[in-house]
Image (cartoon, rainbow, N blue to C red):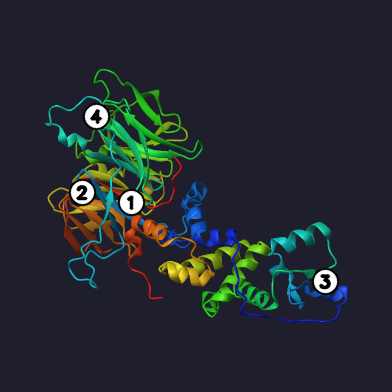
Amino acid sequence: MNNHTLLVLPPEVIREILLRLPVKSLLRFKSVCKSWLSLISDPQFGISHYDLAATPTHRILLRSNDFYAQSIDTKAPFIDHEEGTLCLLRAVHLLLPPPSPPRIPDFFHFDDFRNQPHILGSCRGFVLLYYERGDDLILWNPSIGVHKQLPHFQYDSITREFLYGFGYDPSKDDYLITSIPFSCPFSAENEIHVFSFKTASWNNVPVNIPYSDPGNCLAVRAGSLFNETLHWLVLSKEKKVPIILAFDLVQRSFSEISLLDHLTMEKRRVCGLRVMGGCLSLCYSVEGSAVTEIWMMKEYKVQSSWTKFIIIPTCDFYPICITKDSGIFGSDMRSLEKYNDKGELLEHRTWCTRRVVLLCQSTVCKV
Amino acid sequence: MQKTEGEESKAENEEVKQVTLMTSDGVKMKVEISIVYEMEIVRSFIEVNDADHSVPFPLPNVSSHTLDLIIELVKNEYDDEFMKTFSHDELKEVLVAANYLNMKTLLDFIATAIANLLEKKSVEFIRNFFNIVNDFTPEEEAEIRKTNEWVFQDLDED
């Protein structure tokens, strides 16, 4: 057998390898040759790569100014020791897609702040941006720089609604925005608005929503996406206790998920909902102590599976994700922090973090 | 692995449950039926035709050396340590064979192994590894690289 023949791999075999590489490697290998560039840029390849999820990589994304967002690798150390202290966080600057010009010429510049996009959520590698002034919704994949704009979204201001969320319905291959307005105090009847990117239209579903705002930070209003379901922390008007409200994007139906009973009562106040490590997670502040407890629902919708995961020795802690050694990555609005599995602070960096989304990188470009 | 040049009796083959495969370099190899059943291309043929297992099944795209490696991998339940002894050419040959034979578990295992090997490699390393000729002009290549400069950081030494 001649071992020196140059073995040329058929394209379908190359594809099998590329499907198992992380997004960062794929972006680099676009410059290998023309056929690799077209394969990696192929819309169907992007979907298959995301669905196989052989090497999912997560970055956090935050807005730094009107023009740029920053993306940070959750696995990388805060200070790169090889290159010294100058290389903090290795943030990658990404140029935000531009909004359309305002429909009404802006003679008064009082509302310049309205030009800054809100980051409403993230799903399948896409980030949903909302520019109030142009009333633009932009679906943006920061990893590959692809974006789709929906001008004149014709909705007053989604961020001022009671609850909103961004997700994906795999049964219709459609990206959806869900918006639940504040209910009228005299009536429990209400409507939920679901926007479909495929049809570029709103659907209004009448629904009974006997819930109110649990009365803390605004971040609660953005739904947490887990599989095809959006979740919000709300107050049940009937029982006067916090519960998790779940909206299934495929079935278009609501359900309730209970918090652990003894927690809903004394000394602890629930202050945040996240999806981490494949579980719904809640943050609790504990009366009389400056700690944040993080609890995880180990089995979805099984109330008895709520388990205390970690105690963080700071209040106002906002978890972002679990690190590979079972610690936690989060922020307290002033800095980014990493704790180990015992709740000991490992690293922290002052970093202004108002709204942060966790982005699962993808090369999906088809909307 | 046992290699036979002559015909074996049908009765004996049934007893040990083996199938004879003929590789591209003309070697007849008797392979346990449990391993052969992972090869969808052979399995479907055997099941449909209830074939005489003593008649060698031809594998014109798989060398005896590659088939040996595949049999050892399956026998060792896809042992990482054994796979790490493979040369780059052997990895690629096993991958191509796994694809041809339609061995899903092996294809996933070996494609993942190659992906792990290449994850932090430079573009130049990739071209060498796959014998790919760069068909970009220097300007085109520079343009593609410029869109994502950060992905060229933190690479392994070639």
Q: Residue at x 59, y 64 (%)?
A: B107
Q: Are marks 1 and 2 on the same chain?
A: yes
Q: Residue B122 lies in what quarter of the image?
A: bottom left
- Contact flag, marks 2 and 4 (Cβ < 8 Å): no
Alpha carbon of mark 1 to alpha carbon of mark 2: how far?
31 Å
Return the residue at label 3. B14
Going from N to C along the chain, the mark reached first, 1 or 2, is 2
Alpha carbons under labels 4 and 3: distance apart: 80 Å
Cα gap from disc 3 to disc 2, whole angstroms: 71 Å
Foreground pick, A290 / A274: A274
Spot occupied by residue A91 in the image (x, y as percentages of width and height): 25, 58
Chain containing mark 2: A
In space, the residues marked 2 and 4 are separated at their CA atoms by: 22 Å
Please tell me if label 2 and label 4 are on a single chain: yes
Task: Kindly identify which residue carries mark 1.
Answer: A296
Query: What chain does badge 3 belong to?
Result: B
- Chain for disc number 1: A
What is the quadrant of the C terminus of chain A in the image?
Answer: top left
Question: Which secondary structure, mark 4?
Answer: loop
In front of the other: label 1 or label 2? Answer: 2
Label 4 crowding class (10 Å Cα cut-off): few <14, some 14-19, many 20+? Answer: some
Secondary structure type for disc 3? helix
Whether callout 4 and callout 1 share a subunit is answered yes
Circle 2 residues within 10 Å: few <14, some 14–19, many ≥20: some
- Residue A325 picture quarter: bottom left
Q: Is residue A182 left or right of residue B52?
A: left
Which label is found at residue A64? 2
As drawn, the label of residue A102 is: 4
